[in-house]
Every structure is written in structure tokens, then in C-alpha cells.
Amino acid sequence: MIDRVTEYCRKTVNENIMGELHILACKRHLKDLERQGTKDFPYIWNPEKSEEILEYAETLTITEGFEKKSVKLLGSQMFDLGCPFGWLKQENGKRKFRRSYESMARQNGKSFKNGIRGTYIANFNGYNYGKLFTVATKKRQARIAWEEMQKFINADEDLKELFDIKDYKSLIIAKDTMSTIEALSKEGGLDDGFRAIFASIDEYHQHKNNKIYKAIYNGTKALLETLISIITTRGEELNSACYELDSYCIDVLYGIATAEDLFIDIYTLDKDDDIWNPKNLIKANPYLASTKQGLENLMIDMRTAKDMGGSELRDFMTKSLNLWVENSEDRFTSPTKWKNCESDLELKDFIEKECYVGLDLSHGGDLTTIHIEIPMENGDSFEHSHSFIPRGRLEEHIKSDIAPYDIWEQKELITVTGGITTFKNDYKFIVKYLKDIVEAFDLKIQGIGYDPHNADGFLDDLDIFGAPLLEITQSARFLNDGTVDIQLDIDSRKNKIQQKTRTVKL
């Protein structure tokens, strides 16, 4: 029996020339083959279903360029197309994967593959009156994958008989199933309520938040089968939905997290790879680096980036190497550097230790934060922070800050105080929180720094700690030296005992 997906995975793992994350995606498939049909993994691999879409793809014609040519899939493309369609649920034979996340450098056929998936699902999947979408933040971007489908149809006389294209509406109709393929965008009124049997979400790194993805995905819960395909190249914004999803996908590949419904493939350089070594280009460019012209163009871009640096270098690293490259201008520090300071130590590891406390009081109903710093004998320090927000301000700040405070509350990363009519933090509650921590771990407070803004009536409550109180004026002149010291510590990873913010269990 032909099984090109499994054959490719075995070859890729044995050769070990691709990036680690892509190899892990292949290993994930091979591992699943060994445990398929078990109680803990009730899915089965059907290579015939996988081959169906691969065979369909290689009947298509590429018309863009100087001359027409038949589609000839690379091994990596066979894997990305065939794997999501070959894994089925044992109980009903429907596809296992409902979502997919594929990340690679620019011009490596992300939209090309979704053009194949879209036309295949629309007319050959057996679902009648299905809704398929290509979506993005802007209509022009949303039409890229849609136009790939349009080109495949116009290049094939048989497909022309099966589909009706209404370009002025950005709409394609599959005549046999009456399924529709439509290009949508946020600027065009994209909203909830879509029951998509397929959706292509393009260049996810450009999305300010996950609202478009959630609008599409939330409409699929009643469907037995769907595929929400997120395709992207990485970018510069680490405070983004794309970086969050990318990090989660990496955890899944490493086995730290589990997501059986999510297909993942990330093509990128490994952490210690030399970005100037041409041999590493294939890791982020499975298509371009496999062609003579594509490789030549990549090496030209590489030389330009090396000579010019600056924005040219950042552009090359993101678009050609598919690396997250932080634009650190106007930032106190970067998320990556801050995360490098993380450890598994907790307050319970510092019983009876001396500490310093900082209080950042809120203005009205904003966040109020308590921070505890414990100096260590080796010169490092342990940092514990916890924030509070009144429940009446929760929804407002979720929208204005574009931050998942509700999820953070569930994970006990912040404390939400009061009821829905509470719009101001209860400082006495916050002082009690600090008092409980100090007593539980017998901490010795050496000093308490506080923001004088909104501190009236609050200072008396701090007298119970018997520690000196220091007024910290929040101004550039007053905070500059301390801020610079912290930045340097983070850059050198001296402060590498930073704890994940959490609620302390007393």
C-alpha cells in the first residue's frame, strides 16, 4: 500500500537535515502510528485517505509563470497535505485534525497548499452546502488563498465544469455539493456565526489578536468535521496571538502539552544554527531552497542582510529564516529575555528570608500590584509579583488592554476582587494578602516601597509590618538608575530566578 506521508517522515527523521521542530512533527506522526487504535489514542491512520488528496493535488495545473506545468509535490508538501487527511477518529471515521498551524518562510507555498485543500474539500469531501472561507485582516490578503483556488479551477477543464467563479463577489460555488468558498476580512465585517467546514487564516502574525480565528473556530463546534488552517510566517511582535499559538504548538511538539485535534508543522532554523550558513536555508524554506533559482535568490538576500544589517537583517531573519525577531525599540525589555529569567523556585523555598516589598497602587479601577524581592547569596534575586483588579472593571480592561484577564483569573495569575458592581480595588484585602504571605513563609520585610499616588489612608495599614516605608515617586529622574540596573541584570540573565506570577497557596 502506498503511504508517502509515512515514508517521508521516516526519511526526514533518519536524514536529520531539516529543523528540529519539523522533525518533531514527523516523529509525532510516527509515534502515533505505534499507538493508534488504543484506549488512550482512539484514532487510526488511513493511508488511502491521505493518498486521495495527494493524488488530487497532482492532477492540478499551475498556470502562473511563463508556461503551464503539472503540480509535483515535494515530500514536505505531501506531509502537510496528507497527514491531516489520513488520521481518522476510530468511532466514526471522521478526520482527527480540526485545526492546523503551519509556519514557514515567505514564498514557500502556504497559500498554494490551502488552495488545494479548499477545492478538494468543497467538491470531493461529500459535504453538501458547506461554507468555506479564506480570511485575513484585509480583503487583499484574504484573496490570496482564494485566488490560488481560482487559478486551479481556471486551469482545468474538468474543474471548470464543477465550479462556478464569481470574481466580483470573491465567491466560488461547487456545483455538485453547492458548497461555497468566500474571501472574508475583518475590514469587510467578519463576525461570529460561520459554520466553516474549511477556513484558511492567512499571515496570522499580522493579526492584532485572536478574534478572527475565534470567530471562525467557534462556529465549527457542531460540525463532525472541519479544518481551520492557520498559515503564517513569524514576525517581530511577541505580544501577539500568533506568538502565543506558536509557543503552544512548540509545547505540543515537545510533548509538554497535548492537542490531538491540532496538526502542527513549523519550518525554522534551530536555536544555535548559523544564520549565514546556506545549508540551513532549507530548514525554513522547504520549497525555495529546493530549487536552483529560489536558493540563489535566498543567498542574495542573505548577503544583503549581512552587509546592511538593521531593518534588512530583521526582514531577512523573519521572512527568509522564519525566526521571531523582536523589535525592541521603546521597550523596557523583551519577552524572550524576561522569560529567560524564569525558574521553578517558589516562595516556599525562601522561608525565613529577608525581603523587600513594592506596592504599585491603581488609579481607580486599574491593576494594583504587590511585588516581593528576595536577595540570594549568589547575587541573584527571587521575584514574586501578583496583581489585583476589581470585577466591575474586568470586561472593560479585557477589551481596552487586549489581554485575557478572565483566563488569567482562572489560572490564578491575578486576583479579581468584589462583584460586578465593584469598580475600585479594596486595599485592605490586598494588605491582608501580603500579611498572609509574610506569616505563611515567615518572611522578614526590610522595607516597603510605595507609590504615593492614591496612598492616602493606606499607609496606616502598612504599619502592621513594622518595616520602614519608602515613598517611590514615579518619575524618570527618580526611577532611572534602578530601571537601568534591572535592564542590565535581565540582559545578563543575572536575575535568572524570576518566578512565574501566581497566587500563593497558603
Image: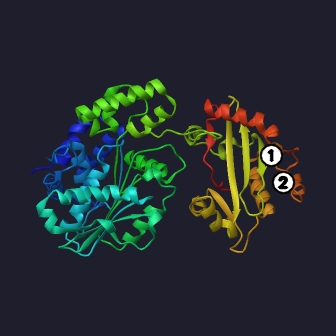
User: Quick check: can you spot residue 108?
Assistant: yes
**Amino acid under disc 1:** Gln
Pointer 2 and pointer 1: residues touching (CB < 8 Å)?
A: yes
State which quadrant residue 289 falls in. top left
Display colour scheme:
rainbow
Position of 313 relative to 322 (above/below):
above
**Amino acid under disc 2:** His
Determine crowd level at label 2: few under 14, some 14-19, many 20+ residues with C-alpha closer than 10 A: some
Front in this rendered view, residue 435 or 334: 334
Q: Residue furthest toward the left?
A: 1
Image position, residue 46 (x, y; %): 18, 58
User: Quick check: can you spot residue 93?
Assistant: no
Front in this rendered view, residue 377 or 151: 151
Q: Where is mark 2, residue-wise?
A: 453
Q: Is residue 328 left or right of residue 6?
A: right
Q: Is residue 184 left or right of residue 486?
A: left
Image position, residue 271 (x, y; %): 43, 33
Residue at 19 percent of width and 46 percent of height: 73
Position of 450 relative to 23 (above/below):
below
Q: Secondary structure at mark 1?
A: loop
Q: Where is mark 1, residue-wise?
A: 474
Quarter of the picture containing the C terminus is bottom right
Q: Secondary structure at mark 2?
A: loop
State which quadrant residue 483 falls in. top right
Image position, residue 340 (x, y; %): 56, 37
State which quadrant residue 304 falls in. top left
